[in-house]
Amino acid sequence: MTHASINDRLGRVVLAFAWFDLGLLVMLLPWTRLWESNSLLAHYPGLIPIVLSGYVRGIVSGIGVLDMVIAADALVRRPAAVATRQ
C-alpha cells in the first residue's frame, strides 16, 4: 500500500463521514422545533404553510437520505483510477 493510496482512503472516509453527518442533519432537521421556529420565515409569512407542509419536510428528509446513500457509496466504491489498474 502506497502513501498516496492511504491518503486517498483517508480522504474518502473523511468525506463520507461529512456527507453522512450532513445527510443525517438534513433528514432530521425538518421534524424539529428549529424548523418550525425559523426566524428567516418571519420575513416571508406566505412561505410558512409551504415550509411546514409534510410534503416539503418529506422532500427535504429524502434529500438527507440520498446524501447518506452517497456517503455509503463513497466508502464502498473504489475510485476509477484504482479499478482500471487491476
Image (tube, rainbow, N blue to C red):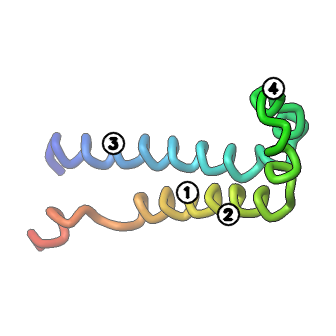
**Which comes before the other along the chain, label 2 or label 1?**
2
Instruction: Residue 11: give its label.
Output: 3
Quote the CA–CA distance across marks 2 and 3: 26 Å
Mark 2: amino acid = Gly
Quote the CA–CA distance across marks 4 and 3: 36 Å
**Which comes before the other along the chain, label 2 or label 3?**
3
Q: Nearer the viewer, mark 4 or mark 3?
A: 4
Q: Secondary structure at mark 3?
A: helix
Quote the CA–CA distance across marks 3 and 1: 17 Å
The quadrant where residue 40 appears: top right
Q: Residue at x 48, y 61 (%)?
A: 70
Mark 4: amino acid = Ser
Which residue in the structure is indicated by mark 2? 62
**Which comes before the other along the chain, label 3 or label 1?**
3
Using the image, determine if residue 3 lies above or below residue 37.
Answer: below
The quadrant where residue 3 appears: top left
**Which comes before the other along the chain, label 4 or label 1?**
4
Residue 85 at x, y percent in the picture: 9, 69
**Which comes before the other along the chain, label 4 or label 3?**
3
- Are discs 4 and 3 less than 8 Å apart at CB? no
Residue closest to the eye, 8 or 59: 59
Q: Secondary structure at mark 4?
A: helix
